[in-house]
Structures are given as C-alpha cells and as structure tokens.
C-alpha cells in the first residue's frame, strides 16, 4: 500500500507542540470510541518535551481519559530512570507525574537492567503479555507511535547501518552504536512493530535536520537506504510535524 505522508510545517516549537497535542487528543478519542483504549508510544530526545508539558495541562489533560490510556516507549537509553538522559525520566517529569495515569498503565523500557539484550527481551515479554501475543510471528498494533528524527536519519534507536534495522521477528532490540548521542547502549522497538502501528507522528524540532528531512520527504534518491526514518510506513497514517517552517 502506498502511503502519502501528511507534512505540516510550523514556525516554532510552540506551534508544533500545540498541533501535536491536539492530534494526540483527537486520536485518543477515536481509539477509545472504537477500541475502548488508547495505546500510545512515547518517543525520546528533547523534541517532545513541550508536547508532554501541554498534555499535562488544560485544555488537553482533561480530554485524556487517563485510566484507559496505556503508555509505552519507542526507545530508551540504558541509564536509570532518574538519569538526565532517560527518555522515561523526561516523560515522567513533564507529564506522568502531573496526570492521573494509573502506574499499571505505564510500560517504561527497563533502562537500568543489564545487559541491554536482557532488557530488550524483557520489554518484549511485557509487551507480549499486554497484547496477549503468544505466537512467534504475532506483532502488536499500537494506536499512535511518536517518533523523532536524528541528524543522521535515525529514528527511535534505529541507526544507519545497524543490524537492528533488519530485524524481522523480534519486537525489540538492544543497540550499541558508538556514534549515538549520548553514547550509551539503547533499547529500541523494531520496524515490524513500528510499521504495524495505526498512526506514526514524527516530531522534528531543532537545528541541523533540514537536509535529511527534505531528502526523506522528497523520496528522491536512496533516502530509504540511507535513513532509517525513511523506512517508517505505518498501516493508516504517517504525519510529519516540523518547526523548519
Ligand atoms: C532517543 C530518541 C531519538 C530522538 C532523536 C531526535 O532516545 O534518542 O528517541 O530517536 O528522537 O535523536 O532527538 P531530539 O528530539 O533530541 O533532537
């Protein structure tokens, strides 16, 4: 199926984050109406910080029926949750600590668990339990997956040239890429999981991403080979929100 990405250019991170918050609330309503719950995968990096803050405040927070919202992560740095580089830590500080989401609805990746391979395997186990997926070739379908874009074209912790890009069976992988910043091992969801999500929303904020973004969106040349983010093809909707206005 060919999918036409929706691209929305904003002039600053405030306007990008407001648009993203409105979309999250809208998609939550649709999911709750049709499936009775909303499964939301949060992203890492700093781009989503303001979105998280907005979702913790009126008018967005009260439109989120938190008891039926389930939160997951697309990737995590292998650090403890209170470490400044923890993706969970950022979301906890900006959002989770401020809204009535039940702790049992929150599925952080076990960043503090060693080795990363065991942490990745454990996360897949907890996802499989949540989705009641017992067969090897079963995959989850998340309602909404948030992603970011790195200057090298990485997304989640799927980096150019890394073996994790070719994973077909596992839901999660440990990633050890020395060029990653911060340079710590990571845990990531894999493409078979990402590309089965109903909607993927990319939040692209910050300098130095214009070239790679333009290449990905123009679908010219070999973007697909060079940039992992260009391989993201969810089942229903693909949105790119950028502040490269
Ligand atoms: C991570 C990420 C990563 C991130 C991009 C963009 O944990 O590092 O999930 O894929 O989204 O690197 O990061 P910024 O938003 O900080 O630019």
Image (tube, rainbow, N blue to C red):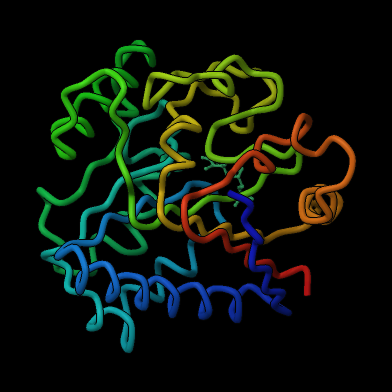
Mark count: 0
Left or right of 160, for residue 156:
left
The quarter of the rendering in which ligand 1 is drawn is top right
The picture places residue 80, in percent across and down from the top left corner, at 33, 31
Left or right of 147, for residue 223:
right
Q: Residue furthest right?
A: 221
Q: Residue furthest front?
A: 1
Q: Based on the displayed image, in which of its 4 quarters is residue 160 positioned?
A: top right
Vertical position of residue 173 compared to residue 41: above or below: above
* 165 and 236: which is toward the camera: 236
Q: Based on the displayed image, in which of its 4 quarters is residue 135 positioned?
A: top left
Vertical position of residue 4 compared to residue 133: above or below: below
Q: Which residue sits at x=51%, y=61%?
A: 237
The picture places residue 179, in percent across and down from the top left corner, at 70, 23
Left or right of 165, for residue 73:
left
Left or right of 104, for residue 187:
right
* 229 and 221: which is toward the camera: 221
Q: Based on the displayed image, in which of its 4 quarters is residue 34 positioned?
A: bottom left
The quadrant the C terminus occupies is: bottom right
Q: Which residue sits at x=53%, y=79%?
A: 19
* 126 and 93: which is toward the camera: 126
Q: Which residue sits at x=28%, y=28%?
A: 138
Q: Which residue sits at x=13%, y=34%?
A: 132
The picture places residue 142, in percent across and down from the top left corner, at 33, 49
The picture places residue 171, in percent across and down from the top left corner, at 37, 27
């Amino acid at each position: 199926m060919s999918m036409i990405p929706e691209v929305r250019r904003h002039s600053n991170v405030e306007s990008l984050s407001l648009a993203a918050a409105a979309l999250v609330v809208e998609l939550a309503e649709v999911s709750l109406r049709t499936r009775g719950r909303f499964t939301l995968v949060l992203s890492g990096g700093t781009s989503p910080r303001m979105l998280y803050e907005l979702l913790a405040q009126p008018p967005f927070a009260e439109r989120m029926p938190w008891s039926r919202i389930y939160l997951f992560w697309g990737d995590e740095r292998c650090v403890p949750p209170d470490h400044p580089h923890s993706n969970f830590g950022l979301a906890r500080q900006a959002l989770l600590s401020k809204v009535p989401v039940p702790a049992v609805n929150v599925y952080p990746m076990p960043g503090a668990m060693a080795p990363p391979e065991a942490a990745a395997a454990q996360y897949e186990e907890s996802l499989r339990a949540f989705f009641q997926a017992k067969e090897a070739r079963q995959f989850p379908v998340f309602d909404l997956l948030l992603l970011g874009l790195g200057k090298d074209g990485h997304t989640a912790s799927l980096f150019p040239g890394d073996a994790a890009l070719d994973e077909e069976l596992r839901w999660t992988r440990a990633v050890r890429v020395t060029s990653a910043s911060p340079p710590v091992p990571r845990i990531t969801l894999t493409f078979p999981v990402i590309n089965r999500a109903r909607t993927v929303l990319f939040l692209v904020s910050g300098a130095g991403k214009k070239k790679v973004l333009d290449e990905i969106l123009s679908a010219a040349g070999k973007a697909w080979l060079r940039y992992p983010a260009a391989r993201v093809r969810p089942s229903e909707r693909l949105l790119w929100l950028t502040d490269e206005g």
